Image: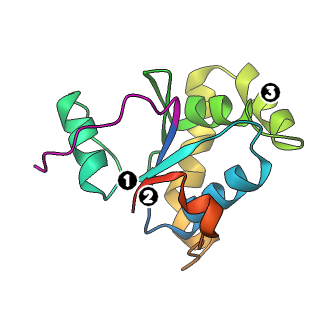
Amino acid sequence: MSSKKFPEDYKRVVFYDGDCGFCNKAVEIILKFKKVNFYFVALQSPLAKDFFHERGIICNMDTMYYLENNELFMRSRAAVKIGTNLRFPYTVFSKILGILPVKLGDFFYNIVARNRKKIFRNKCYLPNQNERSFFIET
């Protein structure tokens, strides 16, 4: 394990699969439509591995995790929480997904997650210089 400590002053952190084109597209959308600042950590990074290990969480690469004010959300609940902090039309998607029971929302999330590498193949988002400041570790 690396000795890096997760910075506690980041209020909204998205943990994503850095090798997934669909996940990279999601990061691009978040950066484009954000109403508030988000920070990003690739699940493959030592920082993410340490974060999950220290909390006793088995990290799945097909799961998006979202940390907001020290509360961790995953799958559809992560998407809902992120969406509430995005501009139209993503706030609408978030509200629709948010009214579903968690099990049903996660059912749809898991369908997308299983097929995510087929949806956007080899899509790698390259952040501009300003956006790079929102990536905690690359």
Query: Which one is closest to the eye, mark 2 or mark 1?
Result: 2
Residue 31, percent across and down?
69, 53
Q: Position of residue 112 (x, y in %)?
A: 60, 53
Q: Which residue is mark 1?
A: 61
Q: Amino acid at mark 2?
A: Asp
* Relative to 41, 133 lies left or right: right
Q: Position of residue 52 (x, y in %)?
A: 26, 37
- Sort mark 1 into few (<14), some (14-19) or many (20+) by Cα contacts within 10 Å: some
Q: Dots 2 and 1: beta carbons under 8 Å? A: yes
User: For the stretch drawn in magenta, what is the main secondary structure?
Assistant: loop
First in sequence: mark 3 or mark 2?
2
Closer to the chain start, of discs 2 and 1, is: 2
Please report the bounds of the magenta region as a residue range: 1-12
**Dot 3: within a 10 Å radius of its alpha carbon, few (fewer than 14), some, or many (20 or more) residues?**
some
**Can residue 106 be seen?**
no
Q: In terms of depth relative to the viewer, which is nearer, 114 or 26?
A: 26
Q: Are marks 3 and 1 in contact (CB under 8 Å)?
A: no
Q: Is residue 58 above or below residue 47?
A: above
Residue type, mark 1 in image:
Met
- Say whether residue 56 is left or right of residue 119: left
Q: How many marks?
A: 3
Circle 3: residue type: Lys
Q: Which residue is mark 3?
A: 95
- SS of the residue under disc 1: loop
Which residue in the protein does label 2 denote?
17
Q: Residue at position x 54%, y 55% from top?
A: 133
Spatial CA span between label 3 and label 2: 24 Å
Work out which residue is located at the far bottom of the displayed protein and give it: 122
The reply to whether the magenta stretch includes residue 5 is: yes
**What is the quadrant of residue 21 in the picture?**
bottom right
Q: Residues within 10 Å of mark 2 (few under 14, many from 20)?
A: many
